[in-house]
Image (cartoon, grey):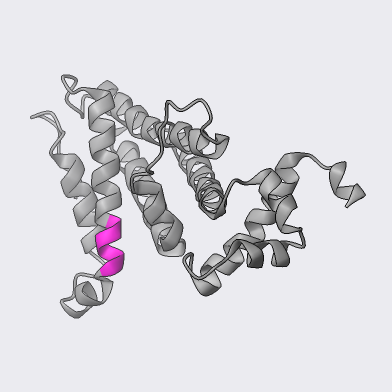
Amino acid sequence: MARRKKEAPSVHRANIARAAEMLFERKGIEKTTVDEIAEVANYGKATLYVYFANKDEIFFYVVHQHMLELLTKLNGIIEAETSTVAHWYETYLEICFAIHNCCKDSPLYFDAMIDEIDVAVDDPDLPMTYREIYATGEELEKVATIMMDRGVELGLIKDSLSYSETAMYFWGAITGIVRMYERKSSYYNQIGLAESFLPRAFLGLVNGYLVESGAEYA
């Protein structure tokens, strides 16, 4: 235990979260107990409560780690050149499919990313985990804003739109599309739309924001 005291709190939080994530995925959130998390992480229960208030906070800490992974991927994608309309569309689709992969690979945490978190954001005693989730969520929405800015510069996207509102619309629409696809993928496969559904849906979404002279990308 003395060795642990020399480590930063972030190290302990990460250790506990790794154990919790393994249990969440094996047993489900409801059936996982704090006692089990402490045991697998090799911490005393009282020590665990030094770093997390409860199981919910541990879960949302894990959710935030997945949000950060997605944000890192999206930021890496938007670093690519978008000097032409074709480049813009390629980057847009790459972002959409990165979000889809997040949903496909981590459905438990993806759902939590886009669902409402029932906490009082203005509560001064709100644990940092929840504040970080909200801040990272805003950074994710900025990716959509950046893509819109570039689309306007290319004469592709209407410049009369409210970027902050439209960024939220895009995020909601894209996450809704991928969520629906993952839940109904067997149906889309049966009717022969498994390969074409996602790109057609993503392109159909963005084509509604084009200027009149903008050529739709097929």
- Exactly how many numbered labels are in the figure? 0
Left or right: where 205 falls relative to 22: left
Percent across and percent down for residue 80 are 46, 36
Percent across and percent down for residue 161 are 18, 23
Please tell me whether the stretch drawn in magenta is mainly helix, strand or loop.
helix
Above or below for 161 versus 52? above
Q: Residue at x 91, y 48 (%)?
A: 2
**Camera-nearest residue between 166 and 189:** 166
Left or right: where 95 falls relative to 132: left
**Can I make out residue 80 in this image?**
no
Above or below for 75 versus 36? above
Q: Name, please, the residue furthest toward the left.
A: 212
Query: Hey, which quadrant is residue 9 in on the image?
Result: top right
The boundaries of the magenta stretch are 178-183
**Camera-nearest residue between 9 and 185:** 9
Q: Residue at x 31, y 66 (%)?
A: 182
Q: Residue at x 16, y 25 (%)?
A: 158
Above or below for 46 versus 42? above
Percent across and percent down for residue 145 are 33, 28
Q: Is residue 182 magenta?
A: yes
Q: Name, please, the residue furthest toward the right.
A: 2
**Camera-nearest residue between 165 and 2:** 2
Q: Residue at x 47, y 31 (%)?
A: 135
**Can I make out residue 105 in this image?**
yes
**Camera-nearest residue between 104 and 95:** 104
Q: Name, please, the residue furthest toward the front.
A: 46
